[in-house]
Image (cartoon, rainbow, N blue to C red):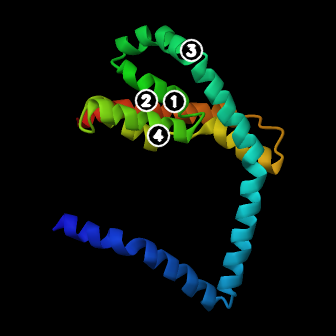
Amino acid sequence: MFDSVMNVINNFSIPFIILAFVAFGLYKKVNVYESFTTGAKEGFTTAVNIIPFLVGMLMAIGIFRASGAMELLIKIISPVTSKLGVPSEVIPMALIRPLSGGGAQGMMTDLVTTHGAQSMIGRISAVMMGSTETTFYVLAVYFGSIGVTKQRHAIPVGLLADLAGLTMSIIVVKILF
């Protein structure tokens, strides 16, 4: 019964939200189509503006991985993580997640394919993916595209939030499974 109710909610939630926005816009006497196209145009402009920052970030990640620095860092960290009960297989994903969502997605896919979706490693990586943010990507791309130069506490707070997400991912999966 619960599954069927959730399936109905899943099937109708996005169309309902879209219709609710359109209805609210019409109620407020806003030209909904014009507002949509203006927002889409601004979104395209933003996408074009972030391309240099995106290319720079992806290039840096590629260099970091291709140089072998990732493997070296994992070897340095793995004795500590193994004592904490963290599978060493999830370390690369935990390290790449603050840098690149796509890179982390690829690593998670590889972990799930290799170890299985129901394995501890697969579950930790999936929860980790949903519990953390691409901190450096956001700072480099979005802050750079709008010209924010004084990031002050953004990096430490973002990394602290990522650490909390990573830690809780492992704890929650170990408790629940």
Residue that appears at 41% across and 15% down: 81
On the image, the x and y values in percent for residue 167 come to 43, 29
Task: Report the side of 113 relative to 133 (left or right).
Answer: left
Circle 4 is placed at which residue position?
105
Circle 2 is placed at which residue position?
167
Residue that appears at 84% across and 39% down: 149
Label pair 3/4, CB-CB below 8 angstroms:
no
> Is 26 located above or below residue 145 in the figure?
below
Q: Judging from the image, what secondary structure is the residue with disc 3 in?
A: loop
Mark sitting earlier along the chain (4/2): 4
State the CA–CA distance, disc 4 to disc 2: 18 Å
Task: Report the side of 38 relative to 98 (left or right).
Answer: right
Residue that appears at 15% across and 68% down: 1
Residue that appears at 37% across and 16% down: 84
Q: Judging from the image, what secondary structure is the residue with disc 2 in?
A: helix
On the image, the x and y values in percent for residue 151 come to 77, 37
Circle 3 is placed at which residue position?
68
On the image, the x and y values in percent for residue 101 come to 54, 41
Circle 1 is placed at which residue position?
163
> Is 40 located above or below residue 135 in the figure?
below
